[in-house]
Amino acid sequence: MPASAIQTILETHALHRQDQTQLQIAEKIGIDPETVSLRFNAPVFPERRIGSDRRSDQALFLQIRQHGLQPSLTRTHYSSGRVAAPLTMPPPDLFESQRRHLNAFFQFCPKAHELPRLCLRFGAMLRWGSAKTLDNWIDSATASGFPFVAQFPTTLRRDLQAVELSVTTPWSNGPIEDQINRLKAITK
């Protein structure tokens, strides 16, 4: 990661500690407000470089540590797709490579051990058509401490009755949506 990127990240955190809003920080530093948000919600200092030389990695690690941030101890890139898919699958269904990647991710972020349970509980509700535990699941997901997970139940609460009906009734508008998408593709 270039030194300018490190400086930007450190500046972002310093301004955040001064109670600046995300928009104010984005304007001062000259970055996108979403990037500011990503930096605040990252559990550790973001490490994106895959290949690098050992000496600069060690210097970077020490520099990051000096500023009180927790650097990534590995250079593995945990993309959302590579992590999300195995989180939603029962452990016996995982390939060995997925299991290894998921275990490495759990070492990187130990708090994420709660995520598979949340995903599988939600999937079970849908599979069995039972909304009895939906309120309990929403409370658990909201309290999970993961902003991206807590956002989903917040959206579900907006129209809880419709969500409960979609879980408990056998009807689906899926076939209609397929036809609409097919028509859109034809008319383009």
Image (cartoon, rainbow, N blue to C red):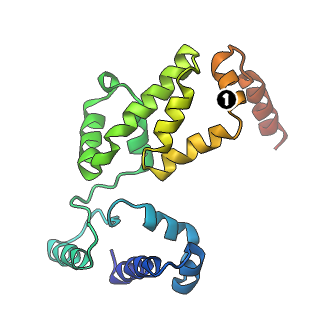
Q: Residue at x 48, y 39 (%)?
A: 141
Q: Secondary structure at mark 1?
A: helix
Q: Residue furthest right?
A: 187
Q: Is residue 86 visible?
A: no
Q: Quadrant of residue 68?
A: bottom left
Q: Is residue 81 above or below residue 39?
A: above
In the rendered view, does 157 fall on the left or right side of 140? Answer: right
**Location of the C terminus (image quadrant):** top right
**Image vertical order of residue 168 relative to residue 156, above or below:** above
Left or right? Give the position of 43 relative to 104: right
Q: Amino acid at mark 1?
A: Val
Tell me if I can see residue 73 in this picture.
yes
- Where does the image place residue 137, in percent across and percent down from the top left? 50, 31
Residue under pointer 1: 163
163 shown above or below 168:
below
Q: Quadrant of residue 48?
A: bottom left
